[in-house]
Image (tube, helix red, strand yellow):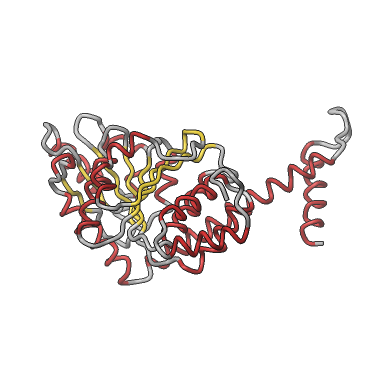
């Protein structure tokens, strides 16, 4: 089958098996199917689901220019050199589907790719079902392929940064001096979802001030970390020089150990599973509603039925179709 031909259900199963055996091209093709969404993406989920649950999912987020990609590059390079099999999923919700990696991410992660880190950029605008389905589906593929940890780096900004953290076991928020990032992180709601903070570009003036500001915000916060009363740690790094990356790797491993000591890791993963089920329901019900609307001959706007009455009547019809 040529690279442009549509995959079939048996081919999805073959790709999943090849991916589990270490075929990176098969993993890449499965990720492409997930990106496109639809029935074949659902088949990919079915073919990979029973082989997941081992990967530690790490989310790295923060403002543009804070050095997220450089930190991701340095951290995953260190982990790969230590014998692990990390994979990176760089998610840009603001870009249309491209079918391949964003060049800038490849350039900034050259060291990581050189030591065997699997890197994939994922543009989710236009995905059938959106970000809520695309990202979990991609994580599932990488987990089933044996990559661990799976690092999600967000390229976009805004509420999506917070949304991405919902897909991770451990969330790292990166800030840098001179950007007002500590305040912006607080405004964006990232303070509440951060498990670990990184003050990058620590060799620049103002880095200690950023760390101090974060400490003060954590002192005043009513959410001192997502695991009980555990306070998020703050690591100082200069990622371009590799400084502080070993400490960050230790902090990430320590957070996973903390999660694993009780029920928090299972709780987070179950919350993610429920959220994905809800996202699938929203997508399926939304499509069914569009079909009902397409077949309904709506009366003129002056008709006796209000929009709410019409919606309730159509909802009853839709429920009957789903249950019947």
Residue drawn at the location 50% of the way across and 40% of the way down:
124
Asked if residue 229 is positioned above or below residue 119 in the image, the reply reads: below
Please indicate whether residue 106 sits to the left or right of residue 139 in the image: left
Front residue of 53 and 261:
53
Front residue of 285 and 305:
285
Quadrant location, the C terminus: bottom right
Residue drawn at the location 78% of the way across and 52% of the way down:
318
Front residue of 54 and 132:
54
Q: Position of residue 91 (x, y in %)?
A: 42, 42
Q: Position of residue 75 (x, y in %)?
A: 23, 50
Please indicate whether residue 72 sits to the left or right of residue 39 in the image: left
Please indicate whether residue 265 sits to the left or right of residue 36 in the image: left
Q: How many numbered marks does the figure carry?
A: 0
Residue drawn at the location 49% of the way across and 50% of the way down:
29
Q: Position of residue 302 (x, y in %)?
A: 87, 27
Q: Residue furthest front?
A: 1
Q: Position of residue 200 (x, y in %)?
A: 20, 40
Front residue of 46 and 204:
46
Please indicate whether residue 52 sits to the left or right of residue 111 in the image: right
């Amino acid at each position: 089958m040529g690279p442009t031909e549509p995959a079939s259900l048996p081919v999805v199963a073959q790709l999943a098996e090849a991916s589990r055996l270490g075929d990176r091209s098969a993993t890449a093709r499965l990720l492409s199917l997930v990106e496109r969404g639809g029935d074949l993406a659902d088949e990919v989920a079915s073919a990979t689901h029973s082989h997941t649950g081992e990967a530690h999912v790490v989310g790295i987020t923060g403002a543009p220019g804070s050095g997220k990609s450089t930190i991701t590059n340095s951290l995953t390079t260190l982990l790969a050199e230590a014998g692990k099999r990390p994979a990176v999923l760089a998610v840009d919700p603001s870009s249309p589907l491209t079918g391949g990696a964003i060049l800038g991410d490849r350039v900034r992660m050259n060291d990581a790719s050189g030591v065997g880190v699997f890197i994939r950029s994922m543009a989710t605008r236009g995905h059938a079902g959106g970000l809520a389905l695309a990202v979990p589906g991609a994580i599932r593929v990488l987990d089933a392929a044996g990559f661990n940890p799976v690092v999600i780096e967000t390229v976009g900004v805004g509420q999506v940064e917070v949304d991405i953290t919902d897909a991770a076991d451990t969330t790292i928020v990166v800030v840098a001096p001179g950007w007002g990032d500590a305040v912006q992180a607080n405004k964006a709601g990232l303070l509440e979802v951060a498990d670990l903070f990184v003050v990058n570009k620590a060799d620049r003036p103002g880095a200690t001030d950023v760390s101090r500001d974060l400490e003060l915000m954590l002192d005043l916060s009513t959410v001192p970390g997502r695991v009980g009363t555990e306070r998020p740690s703050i690591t100082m790094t200069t990622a371009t020089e590799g400084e502080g990356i070993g400490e960050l790797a230790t902090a990430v491993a320590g957070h996973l150990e903390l999660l694993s000591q009780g029920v928090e890791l299972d709780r987070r993963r179950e919350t993610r599973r429920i959220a994905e089920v809800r996202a699938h329901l929203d997508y399926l019900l939304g499509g069914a509603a569009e079909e009902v609307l397409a077949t309904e001959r709506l009366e003129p706007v002056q008709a006796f039925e209000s929009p709410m009455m019409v919606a309730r009547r159509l909802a009853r019809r839709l429920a009957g179709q789903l249950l019947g």
